[in-house]
Image (cartoon, helix red, strand yellow):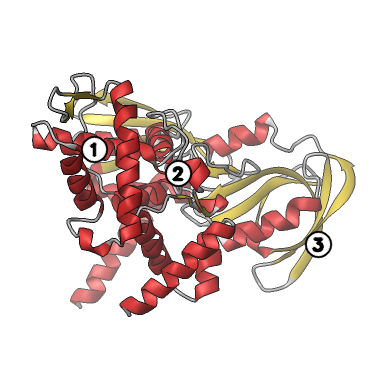
């Protein structure tokens, strides 16, 4: 098995010297799982090969010409920055000056998880060249200082570093790509993503598709979404109405003309929806995976991404064209309830939270009572709906159904 992996890694390395390859393309080319290909890439990086990128742009091998360019700390999009931080961490942990040979030995052990025997001669030479190149740059940046006996130690101006192995850093970067702008900590996560991209890859500004708006916590790449976006390439939603042929719930087909208003991807349902108005200007919503064909209409469209639909998207708790309702919910002020509500409120434009005695009062303007009720159920008896009445009835029916199930179990 080890021999098979080594052979595949050599082939991958040869491929990357010729062109860029995405993870999906490498999986298809070698018939291996995603985790196996990712492990191969990480193993090659540990051997000193500077493989950049990932995600939509794919992986590529840094050429010798590129690798000889002088690196700049946290301004370049180069993996050298992670190596600098590793060297700083080593000096920080040792708490004494180290020679170049000592630095190199500890650096290799750090990169290869304490097993430098896993790296071949070429890999060791690449690592030694990298370390010897980084030392003058780090001296120039005042990250380290040279002692009279030719040893090096961390400077007072250097940042305090914490250990983060390369494999873990790449895994974190991969996961951060899935968090969309609607996540409660989107701004902080974006900052982390950009810093890791600068340290690890050549992609500090990942491209995102701005054709549709997000509702939910994280962005998922889905084949259904990509397929529908291909269908839209030749359909001018912004300018005119569209003729839509779609599957009905009973399995039939229907064709109608509509004014497109907004494409909205809802992460909790993992679905892309087309919102708009029918020819009588009544609000409507269609699941895009049920749309089979779209052709341009003739009537002028004034609704696409209009303030009306953007406001509707802000009011929806998930996806709904129901009339907006003023919601008042009482929460027990205990444990982490305030924090959980606060995280949800960061992507609720009209929400407010105030304390009244021993309880918290949450108010909001919401479309989609069934979806909001689903969210409230996680709080159990710690959440009590004050208004509207239809939301109270939904929560009451849910509690009654739960009670009936317990009675069935006990009977």
Question: Where is residue 5 drawn, in percent x and y?
Answer: 37, 74
Residue 232, relative to residue 364: is it above or below?
below
Which residue position is annotated with label 2?
Answer: 201
Q: Is 148 in front, or is 205?
A: 148
Is residue 332 shown to the viewer in this render?
no
Alpha-carbon neighbours of circle 1 within 10 Å: few (<14), some, or many (≥20)? many
Is residue 302 something one can see in this rendering?
yes
- For the residue labelled by badge 1, is the local secondary structure a helix, a strand or a loop? helix
Front position among marks 2 and 3: 2
Between discs 1 and 3, the one toward the N terminus: 1
Name the quarter where the N terminus is drawn.
bottom left
Q: Is residue 255 left or right of residue 55?
A: right
Sequence-wise first label, 2 or 3: 2
Q: Residue at x 25, y 75 (%)?
A: 408
Query: Which picture quadrant has residue 348?
Result: top left
Front-most of residues 198 and 56: 198
Foreground: disc 1 or disc 3: 1
How many tags in the picture?
3
Element marked by disc 2: loop
Identify the image quadrant of the C terminus.
Answer: bottom left
Using the image, tell me which numbered label, if any, was put on residue 255. 3
Q: CA distance from mark 2 to mark 1?
A: 18 Å
**Gap in angstroms between the C-alphas marked 2 and 3:** 47 Å
> Percent position (x, y) of residue 367?
53, 41
Q: Which residue was labeled with disc 1?
A: 87
First in sequence: mark 2 vs mark 1: 1
């Amino acid at each position: 098995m080890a021999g098979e992996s080594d052979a595949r890694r050599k082939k991958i390395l040869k491929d990357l010297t010729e062109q860029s390859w995405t993870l999906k393309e490498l999986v298809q080319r070698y018939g291996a799982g995603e985790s196996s290909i990712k492990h191969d890439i990480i193993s090659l990086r540990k051997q000193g090969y500077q493989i950049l990128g990932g995600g939509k742009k794919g992986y590529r091998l840094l050429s010798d010409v590129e690798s000889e360019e002088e690196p700049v700390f946290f301004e370049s999009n180069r993996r050298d920055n992670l190596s600098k931080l590793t060297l700083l961490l080593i000096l920080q942990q040792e708490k004494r000056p180290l020679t170049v040979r000592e630095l190199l030995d500890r650096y290799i052990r750090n990169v290869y998880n304490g097993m430098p025997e896993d790296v071949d001669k070429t890999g060791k030479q690449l690592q030694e060249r990298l370390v010897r190149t980084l030392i003058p740059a780090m001296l120039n940046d005042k990250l380290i200082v040279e002692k009279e006996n030719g040893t090096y130690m961390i400077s007072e101006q250097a940042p305090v570093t914490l250990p983060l192995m390369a494999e873990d850093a790449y895994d974190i970067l991969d996961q951060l790509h899935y968090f969309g702008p609607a996540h409660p900590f989107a701004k902080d996560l974006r900052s982390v993503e950009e810093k890791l991209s600068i340290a690890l890859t050549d992609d500090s500004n990942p491209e995102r598709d701005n054709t549709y708006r997000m509702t939910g916590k994280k962005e998922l790449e889905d084949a259904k979404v990509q397929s529908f976006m291909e269908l839209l390439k030749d359909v001018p939603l912004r300018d005119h109405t569209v003729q839509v042929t779609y599957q009905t719930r009973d399995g039939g087909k229907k064709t109608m003309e509509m004014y497109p208003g907004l494409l909205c991807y809802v992460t909790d349902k993992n679905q892309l929806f087309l919102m708009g108005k029918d020819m009588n200007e009544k609000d409507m919503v269609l699941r895009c995976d049920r749309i089979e064909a779209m052709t341009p209409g003739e009537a002028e469209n004034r609704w696409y991404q209009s303030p009306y639909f953007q406001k509707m998207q802000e009011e929806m708790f998930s996806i709904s064209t129901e009339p907006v309702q003023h919601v008042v919910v009482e929460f027990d002020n205990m444990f982490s309830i305030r924090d959980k509500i606060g995280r949800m409120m960061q992507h609720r434009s009209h929400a407010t939270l105030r304390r009244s005695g021993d309880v918290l009062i949450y108010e909001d303007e919401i479309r989609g009572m069934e979806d909001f009720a689903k969210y409230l159920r996680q709080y159990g008896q710690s959440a009590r709906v004050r208004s509207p009445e239809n939301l109270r009835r939904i929560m009451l029916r849910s509690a009654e159904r739960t009670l009936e199930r317990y009675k069935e179990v006990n009977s």
